[in-house]
Image (cartoon, grey):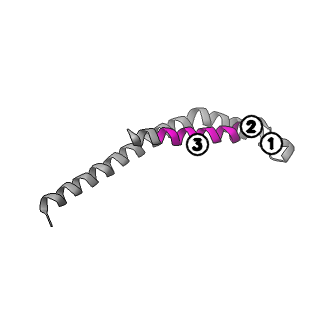
C-alpha cells in the first residue's frame, strides 16, 4: 500500500510540473522569451501527452510496484531462511 501511494504521489508531481512547462510551451507562451515550438511539434506534444504518455505511465507504474513487491518478498524469504538456519 505504501509503495502504491508513493507511486501515485510521484506521478502526480511529475504530471504537475510537466503540465506547468509543457502546456504553456506548446501554446506558445514562451515566445516572447525566444522559446517556441513549431506547430507540428506542439500538436504532437499535446497528443502524445494525452494518448501515449498516460498509457506508458500506467504500465511503468504497475511494473515498478510489482517489482518492488517482488524485492520485498525475496528479502523476507532470505531473512526467514537465515533465521531457520541459525548462527
At x 69%, y 39%, the residue is 20
- Looking at the rendered image, the disc whose residue lies closer to the viewer, 2 or 3, is 3
Distance (Cα) linking label 2 and label 3? 16 Å
- Examine the rendered structure and indicate whether residue 73 appears above or below residue 48: below
For residue 18, which quarter of the picture? top right
x and y percent of residue 16 in the render? 62, 38
- Which residue occupies 83% across, 42% down? 31
Query: Which numbered mark, 1 or 3, is in the foreground of this view?
Result: 3
Q: How many other residues sit within 10 Å of disc 2, few (<14), some (14-19) or many (≥20)?
A: few
Residue at numbered disc 1: 30
Number of callouts? 3
The span from disc 1 to disc 3 (Cα, nearest Å) is 20 Å
**Residue 12 shown in magenta:** yes
Q: Is residue 5 magenta?
A: no
Q: Is residue 45 left or right of residue 38?
A: left
Residues at discs 2 and 3 in contact (Cβ within 8 Å): no
| Label 3 sits on residue | 14
- Read off the magenta span: 7-23
Closer to the N terminus: mark 2 or mark 3?
3
Left or right for 44, reference 65: right
Question: Which residue is painted at 67% across and 35% down in the image?
Answer: 46
Q: Main secondary structure of the magenta part?
A: helix
Task: Measure the alpha-carbon separation of dots 1 and 2.
Answer: 7 Å
Kindly give the residue lying farthest to the bottom in the view shown: 87
Say whether disc 1 or disc 2 marks the residue closer to the N-terminus: 2
Q: Which residue is mark 2?
A: 24
* N-terminal-most mark, 1 or 3: 3
Structural crowding at the residue carrying mark 3, measured as other residues with C-alpha within 10 Å and reported as few (<14), some (14–19) or many (≥20): few
* The quadrant where residue 45 appears: top right
Q: Secondary structure at mark 1?
A: loop
Q: Nearer the viewer, residue 3 or 60?
A: 3
Mark 2 residue element: helix
Amino acid at each position: 500500500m505504501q509503495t502504491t501511494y508513493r507511486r501515485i504521489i510521484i506521478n502526480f508531481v511529475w504530471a504537475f510540473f510537466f503540465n506547468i512547462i509543457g502546456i504553456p510551451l506548446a501554446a506558445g507562451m514562451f515566445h516572447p522569451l525566444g522559446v517556441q515550438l513549431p506547430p507540428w511539434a506542439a500538436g504532437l506534444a499535446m497528443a502524445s501527452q494525452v494518448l501515449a504518455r498516460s498509457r506508458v505511465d500506467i504500465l511503468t507504474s504497475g511494473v515498478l510496484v510489482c517489482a518492488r513487491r517482488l524485492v520485498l518478498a525475496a528479502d523476507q524469504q532470505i531473512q526467514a531462511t537465515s533465521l531457520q538456519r541459525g548462527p
